[in-house]
């Protein structure tokens, strides 16, 4: 095979892997949108917050150390212990559930029956709040997250594929972390599907997604469902935070993955879990291939906007996205 | 006692249809204008101009622009930063290409160019609605910023990739460039604000404005009663982008003087203007001013109290500012989803009956 084609394939595979990571974030959006009709802009910041909390707990940082030092003139920063990764993950999950309860109690409860745009704004406010809160709690310096996931290119794949090309080709470079991420994402989607299809709470969740009032009238507690769904979204955010954090460090830019997930959502449809996955893969492959082929001609860095323009053009032909529910409008 | 219709007789249709039907309101409006034109320019200094007044006026223009699109026509846009960049860069290109023409014309020209770009990105709104549209406008935001970063023609091949405003004068007084005095900056922005707010107010209560509001309330029903959605949506995009473009042009040429596109017109700017509109009140010109004033003053206030008053480190204050802005947005949405303008409206209703509410 010619090398150029092989490089193209390598770019495509890496695009697929990146797409899985986008899909992970998009999944959190879809879950909340389906269950409560809220377009949750804070999902990216949730991922950042989860990752920050995880690192902080794991390394035994003192929360609000910077603030305490500024007020009382002390010099504290660490408790001096290190937790094993699994304990830290469980504790972080606890924090995310707590956060879900707080969000329900202080924000959502008061905004029942408001227009979607108002709820959307509230989640942007929440995003700002959490961003500042996370920074003040754990500090804004870049942190490395290490929960024992494999890192670096897979030598095995490189050796196996090197024979395909000529002398200048050294095999496909695929990050082992991406492979783990793909597996985790697959596992997550399967378990979420099983949960929503076969468990009692999952059915209640789908009922709420279908019709709030009908669900209320058969005795489903809306408030519990909202806490539940925000907890699940927090869990998905935690997984996404771990993956992205391990890949590029825990820092502010982590919250910008929300912006990456938006075109994925548009492409796949806001209400479809398979849509989020397929959309993620299309966007991942599309933007990598575009950058690889057209990018050098127009100055590069096309990844910033390609996904949006692709989604925009696509939506003009299919306004509800790939798998979204058909939009029926009545007067 | 002062604030009521009683005794204020209207004897012609023109009087009946005026913007401020209550006499007290009219006088208040004239008083505000008199202070803005007659007092502030003489007492303003550099700090007040660059920290409070000039950004407030410029953001007020941008907020009115976005309010026309989002508040009056119901099309949520997250591309404001990108459109402001179009205004800034077209103003820069016009300023450097035609140095003999007045800067005021250039700013208006920048608005017209932005309007054209806005219409282009508004075209999908005929098919895409709601959140899908909001996300679609992000395409404009990212694409435009990328374009201005990558195509050297837009920044005249300058080595730094920045654009910086050359000195231009109006009536012999420098209004752009490093030698501009505080009052000159303030006056230029003020003139634009007053003129554009007047235009916006009159557009929104005329035929065009009513067709926008019909589209906002329910586009299918509006279409059935004979509102042309193509015309209404595209005019909303055009007018809105014109305002935003003028704001961007002023932001670059008068306020900052030199900008780097990703920094000055990034996605954060889009959200900031959107917050102004939401906190101020959707579908209200006064709300745009109130929202802009609130979000311009808040950081200044926080900074002065926390850094100046308590001596906290600045990074901590920056984080705290995020927390407070976020919490305030949520608080406002819960307490009064229709924004400061609604509080103002309620206040006026109360004033009419004061001091005998029964």
Image (tube, rainbow, N blue to C red):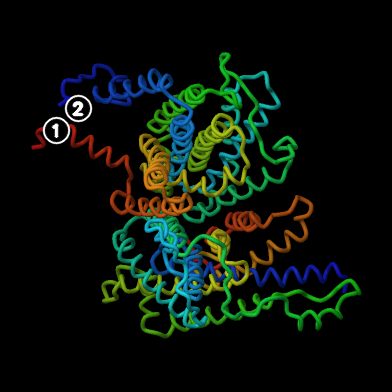
Q: Position of residue A289 (x, y in %)?
A: 73, 63
Most distant residue in the top direction: B171
Residue annotated with mark 1: B354
* Mark 2 Cα-neighbour bin, 10 Å: few <14, some 14–19, many ≥20: some
Most distant residue in the right direction: A167
Most foreground residue, B59 or A325: B59
For mark 1, name the chain: B
Q: Residue at x 27, y 76 (%)?
A: A218
Residue annotated with mark 2: B3
Q: Residue at x 40, y 76 (%)?
A: A94
Left or right position of B208 against A101: right
Q: Which quadrant holds residue B25?
A: top left
For mark 2, name the chain: B
Image quadrant holding the C terminus of chain B, namely: top left
- Asked if both marks, 2 and 1, belong to the same chain, the answer given is yes
Q: Position of residue B44 (x, y in %)?
A: 43, 24
Q: Which quadrant holds residue A313?
A: bottom right
Left or right position of B2 against B202: left
Seen in the picture, residue A104 relative to B235 is either above or below; the reply is: below
Tell me the number on the disc at residue A92: none
Most foreground residue, A136 or B2: A136
Image quadrant holding the N terminus of chain B, namely: top left
């Amino acid at each position: 095979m010619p090398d150029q084609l092989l490089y193209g394939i390598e770019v495509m595979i890496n695009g697929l892997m990146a797409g899985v990571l986008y899909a992970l974030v998009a999944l959190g959006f879809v879950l909340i949108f389906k269950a409560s009709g809220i377009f949750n802009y804070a999902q990216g910041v949730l991922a950042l917050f989860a990752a920050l909390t995880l690192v902080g707990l794991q390394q035994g940082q003192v929360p609000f150390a910077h603030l305490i030092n500024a007020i009382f003139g002390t010099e504290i920063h660490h408790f001096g212990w290190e937790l094993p990764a699994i304990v830290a993950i469980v504790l972080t999950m606890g924090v995310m559930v707590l956060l879900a309860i707080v969000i329900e109690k202080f924000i959502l409860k008061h905004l029942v029956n408001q227009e979607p745009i108002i709820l959307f704004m509230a989640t942007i406010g929440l995003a700002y709040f959490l961003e500042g809160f996370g920074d003040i709690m754990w500090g804004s310096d870049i942190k490395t997250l290490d929960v024992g996931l494999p890192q670096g290119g897979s030598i095995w794949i490189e050796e196996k594929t090197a024979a395909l090309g000529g002398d200048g080709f050294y095999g496909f470079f695929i990050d082992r972390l991406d492979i783990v991420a793909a597996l985790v994402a697959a596992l997550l989607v399967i378990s979420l599907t099983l949960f929503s299809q076969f468990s009692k709470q999952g059915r209640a969740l789908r009922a709420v997604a279908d019709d709030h009032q009908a669900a209320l009238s058969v005795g489903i507690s809306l408030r519990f469902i909202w806490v539940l769904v925000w907890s699940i979204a927090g869990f998905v955010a935690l997984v996404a935070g771990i993956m992205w954090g391990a890949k590029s460090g825990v820092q502010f830019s982590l919250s910008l993955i929300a912006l990456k997930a938006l075109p994925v959502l548009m492409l796949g449809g806001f209400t479809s879990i398979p849509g989020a996955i397929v959309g993620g893969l299309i966007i991942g492959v599309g933007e990598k291939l575009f950058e690889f082929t057209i990018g050098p001609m127009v100055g590069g860095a096309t990844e910033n906007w390609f996904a949006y323009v692709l989604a925009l053009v696509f939506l003009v032909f299919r306004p509800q996205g790939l798998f979204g529910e058909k939009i029926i409008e009545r007067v | 006692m002062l604030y009521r219709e009683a005794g204020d007789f209207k004897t012609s249709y023109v009087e009946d249809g005026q913007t401020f039907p209550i006499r007290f309101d009219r006088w208040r409006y004239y008083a505000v204008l008199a202070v803005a034109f007659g007092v502030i320019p003489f007492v303003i200094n550099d700090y007040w101009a660059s920290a409070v007044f000039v950004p407030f006026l410029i953001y007020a223009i941008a907020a009115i622009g976005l309010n026309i699109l989002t508040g009056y026509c119901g099309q949520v846009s997250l591309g404001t930063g990108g459109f402001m960049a179009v205004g800034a860069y077209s103003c820069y290109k016009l300023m450097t290409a035609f140095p003999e023409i007045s800067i005021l014309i250039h700013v208006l020209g920048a608005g017209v160019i932005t309007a054209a770009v806005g219409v282009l990105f508004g075209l999908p709104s005929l098919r895409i609605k709601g959140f899908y549209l909001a996300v679609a406008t992000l395409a404009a935001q990212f694409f435009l910023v990328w374009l201005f970063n990558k195509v050297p023609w837009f920044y005249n091949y300058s080595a730094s990739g920045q654009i910086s405003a050359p000195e231009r004068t109006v009536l012999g007084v420098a209004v752009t460039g490093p030698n501009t005095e505080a009052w000159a900056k303030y006056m230029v922005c003020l003139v634009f604000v007053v003129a554009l707010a007047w235009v916006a107010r009159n557009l929104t209560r005329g035929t065009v404005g009513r067709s926008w509001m019909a589209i906002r309330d329910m586009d299918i029903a509006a279409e059935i009663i004979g509102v042309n959605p193509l015309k209404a949506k595209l005019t909303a995009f055009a007018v809105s982008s014109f305002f935003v473009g003028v704001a961007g042009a002023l932001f670059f040429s008068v306020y900052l003087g030199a900008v780097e596109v990703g920094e000055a017109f990034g996605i954060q700017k889009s959200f900031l203007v959107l917050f102004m509109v939401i906190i101020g009140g959707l579908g209200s010109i006064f709300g745009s001013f109130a929202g802009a004033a609130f979000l311009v003053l808040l950081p200044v206030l926080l900074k002065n109290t926390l850094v100046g008053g308590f001596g906290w480190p600045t990074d901590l204050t920056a984080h705290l500012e995020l927390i407070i802005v976020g919490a305030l947005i949520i608080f406002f949405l819960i307490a009064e989803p229709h924004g400061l303008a609604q509080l103002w409206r309620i206040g006026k209703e109360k004033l009419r009956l004061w001091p005998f509410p029964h």
